[in-house]
Image (spheres, helix red, strand yellow):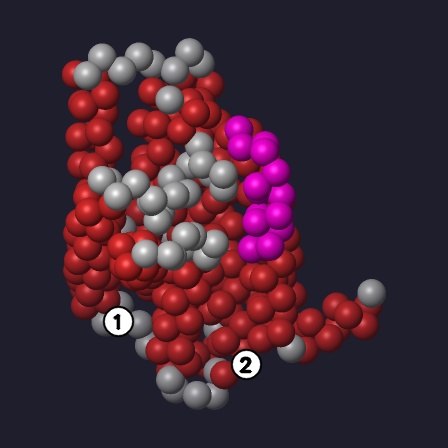
Amino acid sequence: MKKIIDFLRANPLITGVTGIIMGFFVLRILGTGGNSDLLSMGLLRFAVAMIEIVFLVLISGGKTFDKCCNTTGYIFRRVIPIFVFVFIFVGIGTVVDITSGQPLASNWPVQILLSAFLCLFVGLYEETAYRAIINDALMEQFRDHKGVFKLIAVVSFLTFGAAHIIGADLSTPMSVAMAVLKTVSAGAFGLILLFMYWKTRNLWGIALAHGLYDFVSIVQEAIFFGDKALGANGPVSDYVVTDKGAAPAVLVVYAIMIAYDIAVAIWIWKKHMKDVDFDELRENW
């Protein structure tokens, strides 16, 4: 076991790839076994998040959590714009449910608490795997190259985006278009949190921001539909819908999200990243 650990510590790129693949397949295998209630999914995300943290520590050692304090409030203030769109979208959906007479789920208070539990560890898992591990592994492997930040941004963008549509039905041009837009949408959202990770190296801060975003996204479904709203892999998991009637609307929503998140990413980059010394960051990460 010691030889394996030493090997993983000496080879950050292999460690990062192994951690991400392991986490993804654990979710794919155990997350589709019929236990699709919020508690089961939350416990599974908790377990996978802990696995990813182990791999992150193998890559970065004691530096992993050195700066996970004092900047969480800073991160939340900077990423407030990402919540605007989702609040509007969920607000409209909630009004529609209320005006149409949709009854509340029988145990909606419990569903809200379980949704928060789930989203907390979804955020921790995804930020550890698709932001911190990718960043730290590539940084350790290629820190001598000035283009390492561009490489990290591209890999994180594509990997996080693609993770949302792997396994989707891509048998029609409409579904392919939906998958492409969802990949770009998720990737653009991830860039915003990656910038904050570069700025603060506060894993907890970006994980909490991500978790809150996901919670806002699903709270309406938890209140009105409970576990009935869950897909095979979790709430809001059917990113590529097969309903031909709903597909055009989904495409429009994804296009708007892409434009909005890219605009927010550009704003954060120009306003809050200009004082970051990337040469110093690359040398001392």
**On residue 109, which mark appears?**
none
- Where is mark 2, residue-wise? 141
- Above/below status of 159 relative to 78: below
In this view of the protein, which residue sits in the foreground, 122 or 221?
Answer: 221
Does the magenta portion include 36?
yes
Q: Which residues are magenta?
A: 24-37
- Where is mark 1, residue-wise? 275
Residue drawn at x 37%, y 22% as measured from the top left = 225
Left or right position of 69 against 191? right
Q: Which quadrant holds residue 104?
A: top left
- Reading the chain from its start, which is encountered first: label 2 or label 1? 2
Under circle 1, the secondary element is: loop
Under circle 2, the secondary element is: helix
The amino acid marked with disc number 1 is Asp
The location of residue 280, given as percent across then percent down, is 40, 79
Cα distance in 3D space between marks 2 and 1: 25 Å
Query: Is residue 122 at all visible to an observer of this figure?
Result: yes
In this view of the protein, which residue sits in the foreground, 213 or 175?
Answer: 175
The location of residue 246, given as percent across then percent down, is 24, 40
Quadrant of the snapshot with the N terminus: bottom right
Does the magenta portion include 33?
yes
Q: How many marks?
A: 2
Q: Circle 2: is it few (<14), some (14-19), or many (20+) Cα within 10 Å?
A: some
Residue drawn at x 48%, y 73% as measured from the top left = 285
Query: Is residue 201 at all visible to an observer of this figure?
Result: no
- Above/below status of 11 relative to 189: below
Residue drawn at x 57%, y 42% as measured from the top left = 31
The amino acid marked with disc number 2 is Gln
- Above/below status of 138 relative to 251: below
